[in-house]
Amino acid sequence: MINTQTSQIFKTGDIIMKQGDVGDCAYIIEKGKVEILVQGDDGIEKQVGTRSAGAMIGEMALIDKAPRTATIRAIEDCEFIAISAEDFVRRLEKSDPILKMAIRVILARYRDIWQKFSGNQGQQERATAESIEQGYTADSQAINKVKLANELKGAFEREELFLCYQPIIDLEKGTPAGFEALMRWNHPERGFISPGVFIPVAEEIGFIHQLSIWALEESCKALKRIEDELKIEEKLFMSVNFSGDDFVSENFAEKAKGIVSTAGILPSQIHVEITERVLAAEPDLTRDVLQACADNGMHISIDDFGTGYSSLSYLHQFPIKTLKIDRSFVVEMLKEQGSLALIQSIISLGKNMGMSIIAEGVEEDSEVDALKQSGCDMIQGFFFSKPLPESDALAYVKKQFGK
Ligand code: C2E
Ligand code: CA
Ligand code: CA
């Protein structure tokens, strides 16, 4: 529902809005009746219609501040609910991009048609042209997003998506402990599209769950192949990213367990990676699903730790085994004393709660040293390796294990 104010009352004969004035709100007529008057180029005002309870008036002011295209006068005692343009625009900005664009375009076109109909093009023509123009330019981003959304499902079917695996190094042993599976889209025309761009789109269009399940299947199979080739005693893990929507899907934990066992790896080798934001958004549901995953033997990791909600109270309520310190802290670590202190606090907090710590985005050997000294368990970052296609990831770990 649009945020409404208390009703505004107008008496018969009152002018509600005047043609040419700048409008900043629309009204819903709760009671009574109004007439719509338009002044032509000859200066004569004529009635072009009436509106009664349930109708909206002044709606074009919701998209821009162009002058009112008509005068509206109460022909009965009226009550209105006002909808401010500011409130409407704020809501519109948060809405689905297609919906947003359609509303803008429809209202702008409507104004255009209305002006032609009322024979009153002169003074407002420029404002209309500008409002339509703005509608289109402001939404070019939305257009790209919509295009991407339309292409994504086809791309998945055409197998343009694939996974890379970034090694995660155990600092004490100096060898890989596991990988993080990271999705890639090789677009035939646009080249590689970052998951930072297409994952949020997949989330918006309700396609993320299909992608997540595919990523889990593929990465489990890849881990099994790597393990079979590597032939070492030690079990490596595979960290897989999940979104909030994954947990809404029925029987997520059971589904994941089935995938893991079909691939022939242990549930404990799968690290379910989620951000703090997911925990905070649906704490009850997430707690249940994560608990079911943990009961099935899977390992839970918190991604981008420190960037989401500052409340730490949730940490002990979830079966979390690993905290991944966000790259933004690592980047600042040696430049700013506060960041190092923060990292050290996260490490001791996690350790006190029996968790292991991974630092993300490590690029410099000085960062490795500082993290090692601070008691960090594992490191993921370009310093050791970028995310690699499966064959390169296998070659990397083989080399690290002297095979
Ligand atoms: P993330 O989960 O935080 O993944 C880590 C990101 O940091 C990856 O970016 C990785 O390539 C990058 N990175 C790792 N080490 C370094 C480093 O030393 N320096 C720098 N500059 N960057 C480093 P990527 O692969 O572009 O992924 C971006 C984000 O997209 C991921 O952030 C994750 O949120 C999302 N994502 C990727 N794959 C998946 C997926 O399969 N499912 C879901 N739900 N999200 C995914
Ligand atoms: Ca991640
Ligand atoms: Ca991360």
Image: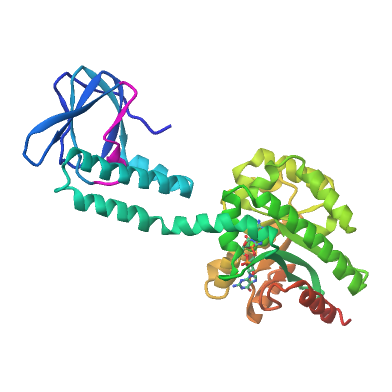
Does any portion of residue 297 appear in the rendered image?
A: no
> Whole-percent x and y of residue 39?
12, 36
Q: Is residue 79 left or right of residue 218?
A: left
Question: Is the residue 165 above or below the residue 252 in the image?
Answer: below
Question: Is the residue 165 above or below the residue 267 in the image?
Answer: below
Front one among 341 and 208: 208
Q: Is residue 180 left or right of residue 265?
A: left
What residue is rendered at 64% in x and 74% in y? 362
Which quarter of the picture shows residue 157? Answer: bottom right
Question: Is the residue 99 above or below the residue 47 in the image?
Answer: below
> Whole-percent x and y of residue 239?
75, 61
Which quarter of the picture shows residue 8? Answer: top left
Query: Residue 75: within the magenta?
Result: no
Identify the image quadrant of the N terminus.
Answer: top left
Can you tell me which quadrant of the image ligand 1 is in?
A: bottom right
Which quarter of the picture shows residue 253? Answer: top right
Question: Is the residue 170 above or below the residue 89 in the image?
Answer: below
> Whole-percent x and y of residue 184?
66, 66
Identify the image quadrant of the C terminus.
Answer: bottom right
Front one among 175 and 94: 94
Magenta segment: 53-65
Q: How many marks?
A: 0
Q: Is residue 116 left or right of residue 334?
A: left
> Whole-percent x and y of residue 76?
20, 17
Front one among 48 and 214: 48
Does any portion of residue 289 appear in the rendered image?
A: yes
Q: Is residue 144 left or right of residue 65?
A: right
